[in-house]
Amino acid sequence: MKRRAGEREKELKKKKLLEELGESRLPYMTPADADFHQLWKTKYSKLVFRKSDTVPEELHQMVQESFLTLRKHDCFFQDLVRIKGKDFFTPVSRILIGNPGCTYKYLNTRLFTVPWPTEGYEIKYCSPQIHDACKALIKLNDYLHIEAVKALQGQNLLESKETEDTPVIDREQNFATSLREKGSVSQDQSSFCVPEDDFTSLNSRTSYNVTLLNYMDPLQMLYLKQEPYFGMGNMAVSWHHDENLVERSTVAVYSYSCEVL
């Protein structure tokens, strides 16, 4: 009941905001704006962006070929989901690939992994091409895992330096404030009380056990809704919070746009 009440409250707030906005839209920035990178650093300090040319070309080719192979073999499916008592097919087609037995749940719909080649498991594929496509996604995951660990290590070093540069009295005040606000501090929530083993922590926070592939041809999706807040045009998936995420874990995203063949 509490969850339903919370959802109703969110819907009322959303409705009120849209009524206040009327025909206007909230401003948003793009990389073309002069202050974009400064805003990014201050408001989204945990977001790490890598340009495509920093990723090995061989990996690009392998992963993108795997996407096209899976699409060629009709491995992407739209899900039938229920929203506010009505059934809808998702505009995005999906396939979940990952460790055997792992699942992913959204909108009360649970997806089961198509397992990628895993040592100790005898996995049979309907074609060698699908086997190679799943294997390519393991290599992408391995690369993203290494990059995520490096990024977190860099952030930890930067935060440590900023802490060292902060006057002692300020650090003590910040520490006291943090304790008062949280009430109690667990090992997972803070690095003040119990130092964590860096390698174990970073490794567990970046262990990607599934890859959710999303595909959509916007030209075929004429019924997409307009993004309501920023006037950004048609949207496939609205802004939302993913309840599957484990606290302090990381998410890696690889985006590929291509012409539909």
Image: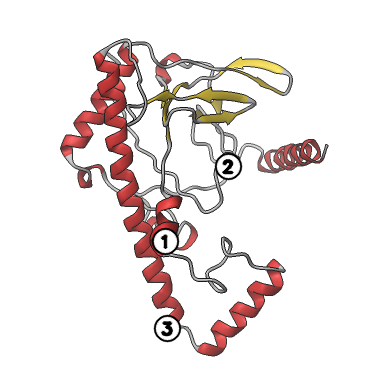
Of callouts 1 and 2, which one flags the residue occurring earlier in the amino acid sequence? 2
Q: Residue at x 35, y 55 (%)?
A: 149
Q: Residue furthest left?
A: 58
Mark 3 or mark 1: name the one nearer the start of the chain.
1
Alpha carbon of mark 3 to alpha carbon of mark 1: how far? 19 Å
Asked if disc 3 and disc 2 are in contact, CB closer than 8 Å, the reply is no
Q: Circle 2 is placed at which residue position? A: 25
Q: What is the three-letter code of the residue carrying label 2?
A: Arg
The residues tagged by marks 1 and 2 sit, at their Cα atoms, a distance apart of 24 Å
* Visible residue check, residue 46: yes
* Disc on the earlier residue, 3 or 2: 2
Q: Nearer the viewer, mark 3 or mark 1?
A: 3
Residue 211: quarter of image = top left
Specify the quadrant that holds the N terminus: top right
Q: Is residue 80 left or right of residue 96?
A: right
- Under circle 2, the secondary element is loop
* Viewer-side residue, 103 vs 76: 103
Disc marking residue 41: 1
Other-residue count near label 2 (Cα within 10 Å), few / some / many at <14 / 14–19 / ≥20: some
The residue indicated by pointer 3 is 165
Quadrant in which the C terminus is drawn: top left
> Could you say whether the residue bearing mark 3 is in a helix, strand or loop?
helix
Q: Position of residue 62 (x, y in %)?
A: 21, 29
Q: Which mark is residue 57?
A: none
Residue at x-position 52% and y-position 29%: 103
Label 3, label 2: how many angstroms apart (C-alpha)? 40 Å
Closer to us: mark 1 or mark 2?
Answer: 1
Instruction: Describe the element under mark 1 as helix, strand or loop.
Output: helix
Q: Is residue 243 left or right of residue 14?
A: left
* Res. 259 visible in picture: no
